[in-house]
């Protein structure tokens, strides 16, 4: 039952109170979910809903009383699929992923954000939800809200297609920084192939999220901080990471105001 605490989330519908929140900002990193809830201007953390299984969730509110969740998906699509299923079950109807990513186009600079219009979904979890051919498309209204938020905040942004893959190293053609120096043949050169297809970035969750939105009937979108420029290096630019994440958080929170 939706009112009972969910097995993985650790909270249920009855824990959310009134006015009932229908939007969640979903971060892979627990620390990012914490930052959204407790260190972001313009929102107040009402309470920690749960820290079950290392997946903290927070109930937060805007000054006008509207409320939303800041929740954690964990790393990768299998974990995200569980969290999203349970969020929808307790009554969430809008989910914006707030993630990090590596750009594969030269013009997509570290520190900017990528707003995903649709995803090339190369994820096993998604195959349990819909056929491979099923589109991984973002909700257009949430997507426009993210673009408008980036514009109003002066955050550099890009809109386009994201490659959503299961693995951080092999799946994103990392060899220099990976212990595995011997990629499977079909992965060699895949980044260049994606670059020619006009794909903007790599990340690891949004393809499954977007397919779930279509199948489950909720609005899904994604904004990712660019923390690596894969045209130049495999490595995350640590000195730019915090500001890049802050940009993505500000854009997501601003967009959420229109839907919370």
Image: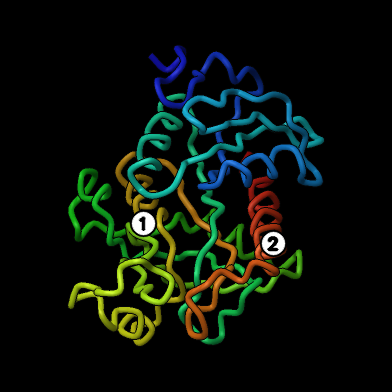
Check residue 177 in the rendering and tell me which mark sits there, or answer none.
none
Whether 70 is drawn above or below 207: the answer is above
Q: In which quarter of the image is the C terminus?
A: top right
Q: Say what secondary structure mark 2 lies in.
A: helix
Q: In this view, does 149 lie above or below 69?
A: below
Where the N terminus falls, by quadrant?
top left
Residue 238 horizontal/vertical position (percent): 64, 66
Q: Residue 166 lies in what quarter of the image?
A: bottom left
102 in relation to 94, above or below: below
Q: Measured from the top left, where is residue 167 in percent x and y?
A: 34, 59
Near mark 2 (Cα within 10 A), the count class, few <14, some 14-19 or many ≥20, is: many
Q: Dot 1: within a 10 Å radius of its alpha carbon, few (fewer than 14), some, or many (20 or more) residues?
A: many
Q: Is residue 256 left or right of residue 121?
A: right
Res 180 quadrant in image: bottom left
Q: Is residue 3 left or right of residue 227?
A: left
Residue pictured at 39% horizontal, 62% vertical: 168
Residue at the spot x=35%, y=87% of the render? Answer: 196
Q: Where is residue 114 in the image (x, y as percent from the top left)?
A: 55, 68
Q: Measured from the top left, where is residue 236 in percent x and y?
A: 56, 69
* Pointer 2 residue: 247
| Tag 1 residue | 207
Could you say whether the residue bearing mark 1 is in a helix, strand or loop? helix
| In this rendering, position of residue 62 left or right of residue 244 | right
Q: How is the image coloured?
A: rainbow
Q: What is the tally of numbered marks visible in this picture?
A: 2
Q: Which residue is drawn at 69% across and 32% down?
A: 60
Q: Which residue lies furthest to the front in this view?
A: 179
Q: Indicate which disc, 1 or 2, sits on the residue closer to the N terminus.
A: 1
> Which of the 4 image quarters holds residue 86?
top left
Q: Which of 31 and 124 is in front in this view?
A: 31
Badges 1 and 2: C-beta atoms under 8 Å apart? Answer: no
């Amino acid at each position: 039952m939706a009112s009972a605490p969910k097995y993985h989330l650790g909270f249920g519908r009855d824990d959310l109170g009134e006015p009932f929140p229908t939007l969640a900002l979903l971060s892979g990193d627990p620390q990012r979910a914490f930052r959204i809830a407790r260190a972001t201007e313009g929102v107040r953390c009402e309470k920690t809903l749960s820290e079950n299984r290392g997946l903290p969730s927070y109930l937060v509110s805007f000054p006008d009383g509207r409320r939303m969740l800041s929740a954690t998906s964990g790393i990768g699509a299998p974990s995200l699929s569980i969290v999203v299923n349970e969020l929808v079950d307790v009554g969430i109807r809008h989910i914006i992923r707030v993630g990090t990513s590596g750009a594969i186009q030269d013009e997509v600079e570290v520190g900017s954000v990528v707003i995903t219009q649709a995803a090339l979904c190369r994820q096993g979890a998604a195959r349990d939800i819909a056929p491979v051919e099923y589109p991984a498309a973002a909700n257009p209204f949430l997507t426009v809200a993210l673009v408008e938020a980036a514009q109003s905040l002066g955050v550099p942004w890009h809109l386009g297609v994201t490659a959503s893959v299961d693995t951080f190293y092999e799946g994103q053609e990392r060899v220099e920084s990976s212990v595995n120096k011997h990629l499977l043949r079909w992965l060699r050169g895949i980044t260049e192939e994606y670059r020619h297809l006009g794909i903007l970035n790599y990340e690891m969750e949004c393809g499954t999220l977007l397919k779930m939105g279509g199948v489950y009937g909720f609005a899904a979108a994604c904004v990712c901080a660019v923390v690596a420029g894969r045209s130049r290096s495999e490595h995350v630019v640590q000195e730019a990471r915090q500001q890049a994440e802050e940009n993505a958080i500000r854009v997501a929170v601003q967009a959420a105001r229109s839907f919370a």
